[in-house]
Image: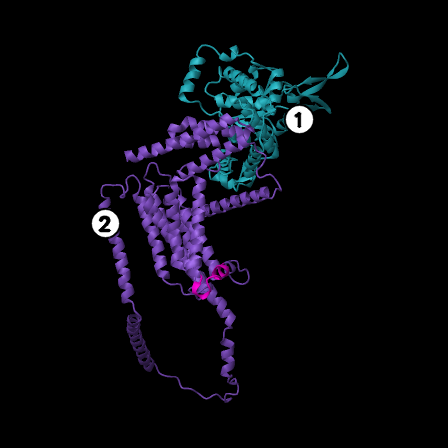
Chain colours: A purple, B cyan
């Protein structure tokens, strides 16, 4: 299911969800390590700034754009360090630069606020850049939710364990779910027959706004009404009712007991010689007392149990909502619908595989840089180019909703590709044919063939763009 | 790597297919598999209901080859000596002479093999695997190429003796023909209306040429990732929860040889995972044994093999 959301709306929802756990994480970091020393709002501001910078530099070449993005992040981190983290007034003018560098490079003990600010600023900036390049669709929204929710739960769990009071935790959770649910609704609405595209979109948008207003209003009313005094009053009322009920039950039992004749108590001939000696009350109390460490462990287990239970409930609800959405989107002709069962596992495995690939790449690069062994295997450059091209084709088609299954051969996948993009049948067949020759036949293609394949690949992408535009016009 | 080999094999495959196609209509895939078995010098078991052309296919194959052809019609009273031959006392010469049995031919058709007793069935084991027979402590090599084509009927099981696993494993592939499509069946009726085209069938491939083609087919490249894929498929049959006995090492060897031959028949000098997928069912289906629970659920060897093929990752980017 890869319905692309309208760009602005989709980015808003995905970015909103990411911002929620980023803010929580920063607050936790601040409370735990450097109270009131991290400029949290300014740090979070780096997220939209990075996104905007990347979008504004779209006219530049890829390398220039990357350089601009990284330079922007460094400048932003430096600005934050200089203007927020460092108390400039406390140092003489000539010494503050030196002090700044010293504190930034300090290596002993726990990280200081300047280092934390620098790290957080860079990380958030990278997050903003990532948001700018990510293709926002329903699948991305779902992945963000799947990964964002455990991150949030982990942050709250840590906060609970460290007795750290996070400000506005409820608001963060509420915002996180709101972003996801509204994003899911928008994804549903952005298909060809959806309400975001249909004639009645104004009416639907009004209904949506009204619903959001009702939920927010009700929430505000509840938070205003539920004060400690009101709670005390309600609890006092319940206590009175409970006491009255108990009193009536006791009276009833006493009345019934009076109706039954009492047996006569005869004195024991031995005079109570077998009675045990009364124990010291403090001994019994000591026996009943639970050691402190047991209580701590038990408390931890109970807390973990409730958190897990809460997480499972949330996950189950989210799965049900997503399943419902997917079922309804199944009606679309051109939608790629996957079963939700195991989707989280699949995402996680994909992430781990990607991380493994990256790690392997870095290790290979390091080996190459250190001159210990050649960077890639002994593939000729032309063969490597063809394989790279086919890899791009796979990634591109997967992003467009036509992924290759692991058990499909290139020719089997070609059939699927041709169904997906019939007008490029011949070109896709050409790419597949040359790829199989390289991959399984050990062939080394000519440079001309590589050029031909690259131009064919560009043509295929253009065809897809054209057909997408045509489909939108027809819709 | 041979540059012209695959082309020659492809031409020979086309000659063979079109020749056999004169009598067997609408079975080009089965005929291609038979030619692949010939290229591997592998034995073929054809199993299907009566009257769908099993024996005809085997006879047409034998006719298309320029070699010796013998037919053994199996019955419960068939003895091993009827198959491999006997030593008899020649009174004129005053010595024992060897009279070869029908198994000493290039192409041997063993019709309704499951009607022969296990004793007779097992006398074929040596000839199938080692291309020789031993009679009265004397070993006689079989002519090359040697291809045994057996047929059996899966529904009339009374008075039959199911083939043991050891013997099944010696067949390179098992084919099921099935009923032809209405159009093909109409073609059969038209072609056989006046005469039997089998009588006009001539040989198109000589035995010497076939031996050369076999050597060429064996030189088809099978890249390491494809070989690993082949092994993964075979091993997956051993680990499937519904399979009691998976594919043997011999089956992996057979699958490798058959995929090389298929690639060569299709004009390629390298094997692709598609070849392995196409051949997995005919090469492995008779070599695996299902668990009783799976059989009771109505699952077949073909189903499970397709399931295996749908789980083993193909080496692509």
Residue B271 relative to residue A93: left or right: right
**Quadrant assignment, res A440:** top right
What x and y, as percent, mark residue B75? Answer: 58, 24
Q: Is residue A355 visible?
A: yes
Residue, disc 2? A206
Of residues B78 and A153, the one drawn nearer to the viewer in this rendering: A153
The answer to whether A260 is drawn above or below residue B110 in the figure is below
How crowded pointer 1 is (Cα within 10 Å; few <14, some 14-19, many 20+) is rated as few
Magenta part of the chain: A86-100
Give SS at disc 2.
helix
> Looking at the rendering, in which quadrant would you find the C terminus of chain A?
top left
The answer to whether A32 is drawn above or below residue A180 in the figure is below
Residue, disc 1? B130
Camera-nearest label, 2 or 1: 2
Per the model, the C-alpha gap separating discs 2 and 1 is 83 Å
Membership of A363 in magenta stretch: no
What x and y, as percent, mark residue A275? Answer: 51, 85
The answer to whether A140 is drawn above or below residue B274 in the figure is below
Residue occupying image coordinates x 28% and y 40%:
A193
**Quadrant assignment, res B184:** top left
Q: Chain of mark 1?
A: B
Q: Is residue B155 visible?
A: no
Of residues B315 and A431, the one drawn nearer to the viewer in this rendering: A431
Residue furthest toward the front?
A94
> Looking at the rendering, in which quadrant would you find the N terminus of chain A?
top left
Whether label 2 touches label 1, CB < 8 Å: no
């Amino acid at each position: 299911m890869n319905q692309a959301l309208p760009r602005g709306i989709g980015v808003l929802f995905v970015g909103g969800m990411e911002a929620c756990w980023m803010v929580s994480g920063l607050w936790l970091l601040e409370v735990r390590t450097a109270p009131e020393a991290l400029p949290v709002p300014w740090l979070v501001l780096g997220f939209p700034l990075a996104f905007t910078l990347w979008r504004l530099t779209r006219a530049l070449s890829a390398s220039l754009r990357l350089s601009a993005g990284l330079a922007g992040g460094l400048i932003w981190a430096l600005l934050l360090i200089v203007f927020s983290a460092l108390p400039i007034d406390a140092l003489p003018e000539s010494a503050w630069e030196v002090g700044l560098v010293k504190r930034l490079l300090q290596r002993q003990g726990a990280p200081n606020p300047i280092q934390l600010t620098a790290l957080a600023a860079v990380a958030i900036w990278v997050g903003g850049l990532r948001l700018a390049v990510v293709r926002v669709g329903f699948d991305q929204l779902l992945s963000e939710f799947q990964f964002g929710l455990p991150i949030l739960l982990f942050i709250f769990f840590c906060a609970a364990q460290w007795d750290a009071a996070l400000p506005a935790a409820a608001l963060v959770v509420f915002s996180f779910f709101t972003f996801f649910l509204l994003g899911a609704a928008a994804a549903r609405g952005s298909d060809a027959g959806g309400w975001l595209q249909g004639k009645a979109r104004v009416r639907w948008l009004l209904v949506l706004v009204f619903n959001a207003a009702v939920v927010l209003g009700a929430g505000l009313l509840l938070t205003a009404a539920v004060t400690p005094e009101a709670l005390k009053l309600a609890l006092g009322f319940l206590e009175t009712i409970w006491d009255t009920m108990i009193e009536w039950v006791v009276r009833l039992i006493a009345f019934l007991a009076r109706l039954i004749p009492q047996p006569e108590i005869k004195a024991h001939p031995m005079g109570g010689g077998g009675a045990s000696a009364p124990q010291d009350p403090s001994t019994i109390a000591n026996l009943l007392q639970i050691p402190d460490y047991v209580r701590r462990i038990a408390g931890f287990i109970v807390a973990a149990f409730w958190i897990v239970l809460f997480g499972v409930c949330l996950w189950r609800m989210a799965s049900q909502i997503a399943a419902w959405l997917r079922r309804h989107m199944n009606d679309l002709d051109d939608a790629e619908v996957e079963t939700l069962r195991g989707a989280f596992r699949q995402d996680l495995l994909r992430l781990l595989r990607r991380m493994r690939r990256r790690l392997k790449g870095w290790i290979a690069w390091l080996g190459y840089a250190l001159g210990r062994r050649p960077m890639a295997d002994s593939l000729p450059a032309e063969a490597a180019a063809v394989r790279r091209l086919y890899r791009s084709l796979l990634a591109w088609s997967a992003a467009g909703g036509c992924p290759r299954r692991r058990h499909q051969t290139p020719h089997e996948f070609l059939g699927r590709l041709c169904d997906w993009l019939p007008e490029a049948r011949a070109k896709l067949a050409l790419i597949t044919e040359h790829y199989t020759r390289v991959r399984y036949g050990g062939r080394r293609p000519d440079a001309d063939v590589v050029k031909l394949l690259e131009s064919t690949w560009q043509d295929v992408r253009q065809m897809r763009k054209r057909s997408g535009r045509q489909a939108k016009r027809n819709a | 790597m041979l540059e012209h080999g695959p082309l020659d094999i492809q031409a020979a495959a086309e000659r063979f297919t079109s020749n056999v196609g004169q009598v067997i209509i609408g079975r080009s895939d089965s005929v291609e598999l038979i030619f692949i078995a010939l290229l591997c010098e592998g034995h073929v078991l054809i199993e299907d209901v009566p009257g769908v052309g099993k024996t005809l296919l085997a006879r047409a194959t034998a006719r298309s080859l320029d070699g010796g052809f013998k037919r053994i019609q199996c019955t419960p009273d068939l003895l091993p000596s009827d198959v491999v031959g006997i030593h008899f006392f020649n009174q004129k010469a005053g010595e024992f002479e060897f009279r070869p049995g029908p198994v000493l031919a290039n192409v041997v058709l063993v019709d309704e093999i499951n009607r022969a007793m296990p004793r007779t069935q097992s006398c074929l084991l040596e000839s199938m695997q080692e291309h020789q027979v031993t009679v009265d402590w004397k070993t006689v090599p079989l002519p090359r190429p040697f291809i045994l084509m057996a047929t059996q009927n899966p529904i009339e099981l009374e008075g039959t003796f199911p083939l043991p696993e050891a013997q099944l494993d010696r067949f390179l592939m098992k084919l099921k023909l099935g009923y032809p499509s209405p159009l093909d069946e109409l073609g059969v009726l038209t072609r056989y209306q006046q005469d039997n085209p089998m009588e006009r069938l001539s040989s198109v491939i000589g035995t010497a040429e076939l031996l050369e083609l076999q050597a060429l087919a064996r030189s088809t490249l099978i890249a390491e990732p494809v070989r690993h894929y082949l092994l993964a498929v075979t091993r997956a049959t051993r680990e499937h929860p519904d399979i009691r006995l998976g594919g043997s090492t011999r089956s992996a060897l057979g699958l490798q040889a058959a995929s090389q031959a298929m690639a060569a028949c299709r004009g390629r000098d390298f094997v692709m995972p598609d070849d392995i997928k196409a051949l997995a069912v005919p090469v492995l289906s008779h070599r695996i044994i299902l668990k009783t629970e799976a059989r009771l659920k109505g699952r077949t060897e073909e189903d499970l093999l397709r399931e295996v093929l749908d789980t083993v990752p193909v080496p692509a980017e």
